[in-house]
Image (cartoon, rainbow, N blue to C red):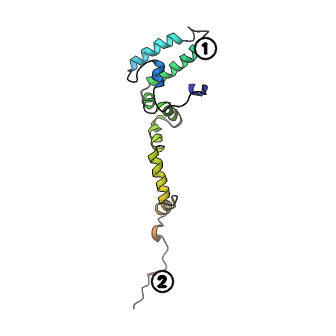
């Protein structure tokens, strides 16, 4: 269960801004800037320093999650390009398949898929032509009388 599952008000975003806001750094921040900001905020909101403040504990979890993602170069690139939705897809399908997922779910890819279905009678022609080579009767069995041409 991830931190997003605990809060029903959270939605997956397609922009990657909120983790930077949590840590108080710009998107152009270096790894050292992120580390410094994390340490400063972690000390301030640590549950041991705020035992009676439940909000500080939740804030600490958010800070920890933001640091974990932004410190990892691969996860940070995914987050910058696709937001938290990209991170969710990376968890489900693997980090190397995120780009493929977004290409296959793009509008133009769906349009190509739909047009191919329309032009091939719901892919019937594709199956018959490509898989079984039935196009234009090429695989039709020949009878001996068809080869005979009478002399006129």
Per the model, the C-alpha gap separating discs 1 and 2 is 91 Å
Q: Are marks 1 and 2 in contact (CB under 8 Å)?
A: no
Identify whether 83 is placed above or below 65.
Answer: below
At 50% from the left and 13% from the top, the residue drawn is 42
Identify whether 104 is placed above or below 88.
Answer: below
Q: Quadrant of residue 27?
A: top left
Of 17 and 46, which appears nearest the observer? 17
Foreground tag (1 vs 2): 1
Q: Position of residue 113 (x, y in %)?
A: 48, 51
Q: Position of residue 52 (x, y in %)?
A: 62, 9
Of 91 and 113, which appears nearest the observer? 113
Residue occupying the far bottom of the picture: 152
Of 60 and 139, which appears nearest the observer? 60
Q: Secondary structure at mark 2?
A: helix
Q: Which mark is residue 145?
A: 2
Neighbour tally class for label 1: few under 14, some 14-19, many 20 plus, Cα within 10 Å: few
Picture quarter with the C terminus: bottom left
Residue at image mark 1: 54
Neighbour tally class for label 2: few under 14, some 14-19, many 20 plus, Cα within 10 Å: few
């Amino acid at each position: 269960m991830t931190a997003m599952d605990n809060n029903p008000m959270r939605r997956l975003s397609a922009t990657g801004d909120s983790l930077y806001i949590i840590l108080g750094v710009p998107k152009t921040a270096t790894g050292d800037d992120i580390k410094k900001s994390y340490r400063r905020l972690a000390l301030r909101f640590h549950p041991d320093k705020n035992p009676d403040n439940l909000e500080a504990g939740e804030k600490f979890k958010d800070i920890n999650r933001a640091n974990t993602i932004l410190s990892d170069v691969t996860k940070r690139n995914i987050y910058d390009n696709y937001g938290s939705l990209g991170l969710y897809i990376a968890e489900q399908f693997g980090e190397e398949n995120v780009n493929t997922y977004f290409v296959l779910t793009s509008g133009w890819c769906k349009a190509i898929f739909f047009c191919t279905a329309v032009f091939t009678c719901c892919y019937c022609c594709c199956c018959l032509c490509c898989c079984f080579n039935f196009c234009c009767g090429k695989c039709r069995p020949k009878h001996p009388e068809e080869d005979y041409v009478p002399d006129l």
